[in-house]
Amino acid sequence: MKSPELLRETADVLEETEERIKKLTSLSLRRKQNALNKLREAKENFRKMASEVVIDNEELAEFFLKRAVRLKNATNNKSIEKLGEKEYMKDIDAILRYSRAIPYDFAGYMKYVNRAYKAYVWGMISFFVVTAFLPVEFKITSLILLIPIILSLLSLRKRGHSGLMLAFAAIPIPLITGALAVRAYLDVFISPTGLQEAAQGLGVSPSTAQAIAGAMVLFGIAELVLLSYALYMFYKHRHAFL
């Protein structure tokens, strides 16, 4: 495999870039220290992954090396004065993001992201099923969330950071809805009045209302468990998204 050697070369180039940054006069002291801290982390990430590669992705490793070389070549006072400090720091940030994402491309960590994605999909399906039998305001809420959820799913498949942010924004309301739904549907079993109201509201017999409530309790619990798991895993593996 060529990927380990390319990743080590990338780390070496970043180490050389560190030395160049120390000699710069075009960066403020605060930004210089910030750049050094980020480059040190990126360098260690690349160096560590070089010894842990299980998936050979030579093309991507070459891309990282080229970006590191480009950053190194831009690390001089003349280039930074031309680009501006902010643009230069964007390149530093990009290298750091790449270094944090490499376990998902070279060490097989994408399996954890895929599990979170599946949990998110099924959790949202459960959310829409549960709201189908709730009052109209819950149905309206689910329709409002439909577009952001679809957009987040499309972006998450491409490991887009915007999809991750949309998922973080979309999950809380279904979690609250799921908790309220479980409580409401359980009331059908606990309270005779609740059973009667449910049967009348659905226009079905009490036994059918109980069957529907039982199914909705299961969907509500599934929604809570799956979306909580997805939220936790997406946050834990947030660096996979670029």
Image (cartoon, rainbow, N blue to C red):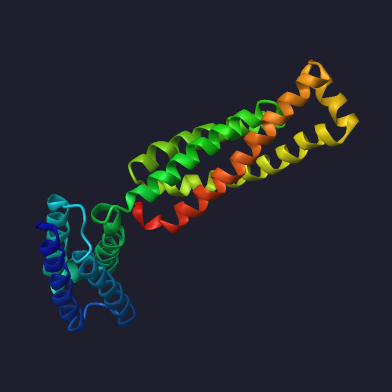
Query: Total of numbered circles in the picture?
Result: 0
Q: Residue placed at 79% from the left, 15% from the top?
A: 203
Which quadrant is the N terminus positioned in? bottom left
Q: Is residue 40 visible?
A: yes
Query: Which residue is painted at 65% across and 37% down in the image?
Result: 220
Residue at the image point whose x is 28% and y is 78% from the top: 32
Q: Is residue 176 above or below residue 69?
A: above
Q: Position of residue 157 (x, y in %)?
A: 36, 40
Residue 168 visible, this angle: no
Residue 161 left/right relative to 81: right
Closer-to-camera residue (199/9): 199
Identify which residue, 61 or 115, lies in the foreground. 115
How far from the left and from the top, in percent, is residue 50?
18, 65
Query: Which residue is nearer to you in this view: 100 or 95?
Result: 100
Residue depicted at x 20% and y 59%: 53
- In the image, residue 156 sits, relative to residue 125, either above or below, namely below
Q: Report the side of 70 relative to 103 (left or right).
A: left
Left or right, residue 226 beside residue 20: right
Instruction: Give the farthest residue toward the right.
Output: 193
